[in-house]
Image: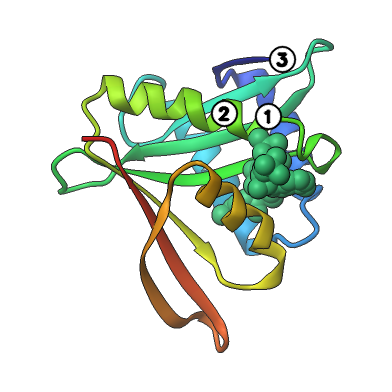
């Protein structure tokens, strides 16, 4: 498996892997695809950068999308990290996150933020962030829906 920048031919595979996430709602998939299209249209831009994990057979197993938070001094948002369920728990997400963190560190990132839901389908994602040193910074109650809180995780790089 190798981690590399997104290429235009990745789009169909990325769409497939988003649809394979049974807990993603249609509007979440739509927004994720919009960011993929922006990243493809503006390669090298700081706003939305995407790294893909490619298996030995050329399949895209997962991706991470991140970018500089506008109007901040060196804060970066990680917008999405998604691995196809067929490859969960095999280290793909960790490789993507580590490589993205290296890239953000090269850009002098000071603080990394990730937002996620408090609900059950995101238990594994929250455990994953905790394992990688992200700590809860804030919680907005009933943000996505009643009883579905937004949790903001952060990790200081410097
Ligand atoms: C969160 C996610 C990206 C992690 O990717 P991954 O490739 O499974 O993660 P890794 O194999 O590198 O790391 C596994 C660790 O993450 C957690 N984890 C996440 N999903 C897991 C799974 N299905 N099985 C086992 N562990 C899982 C555990 O803490 C595990 O730690 P451990 O190995 O010490 O037990 C992946 O589960 C995923 O795509 N989830 C659905 C998409 C999603 O909800 N993304 C978050 C949007 S905010």
Which residue has dot 2 on it? 96
Q: Residue at x 68, y 29 (%)?
A: 92
Question: Is label 2 in a helix, a strand or a loop?
Answer: helix
Q: Earlier in the sequence, mark 2 or mark 3?
A: 3
Q: Tell me the quadrant of ligand 1.
A: top right
Q: Residue at x 59, y 32 (%)?
A: 94
Q: Is mark 1 within 8 Å of ligand 1?
A: yes
Which residue has dot 3 on it? 1
Q: Is residue 126 left or right of residue 152?
A: right
Mark 2 Cα within 10 Å, few/some/many (few <14, many 20+)?
A: many
Q: Earlier in the sequence, mark 1 or mark 3?
A: 3
Q: Is mark 3 within 8 Å of ligand 1?
A: no
Where's residue 132, x and y in %? 50, 41
Q: Residue at x 77, y 52 (%)?
A: 21
Above-or-below relation of 146 to 115: below
Q: Nearer the viewer, residue 138 or 84?
A: 138
Q: Nearer the viewer, residue 75 or 16?
A: 75
Position of the C terminus by quadrant: top left
Mark 3 Cα within 10 Å, few/some/many (few <14, many 20+)?
A: some
Where's residue 120, x and y in %? 70, 70
């Amino acid at each position: 498996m190798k981690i590399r920048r997104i290429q235009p031919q990745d789009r169909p595979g990325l769409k497939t892997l988003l649809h394979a996430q049974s807990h993603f709602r249609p509007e979440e998939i739509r927004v994720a695809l919009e960011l993929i299209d922006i990243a493809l249209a503006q390669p090298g831009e700081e706003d939305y950068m995407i790294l893909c994990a490619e298996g030995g057979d050329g399949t895209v197993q997962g991706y991470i999308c991140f970018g500089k938070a506008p109007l901040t001094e060196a804060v970066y948002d990680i917008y999405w990290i998604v691995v196809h369920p067929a490859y969960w728990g095999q280290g793909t997400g960790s490789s993507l996150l580590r490589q993205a963190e290296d890239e953000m560190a090269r850009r002098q990132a000071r603080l990394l933020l990730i937002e996620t839901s408090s609900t059950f389908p995101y238990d594994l994602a929250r455990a994953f962030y905790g394992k990688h040193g992200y700590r809860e910074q804030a919680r907005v109650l009933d943000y996505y829906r009643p009883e579905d809180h937004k949790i903001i995780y952060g990790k200081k790089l410097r």
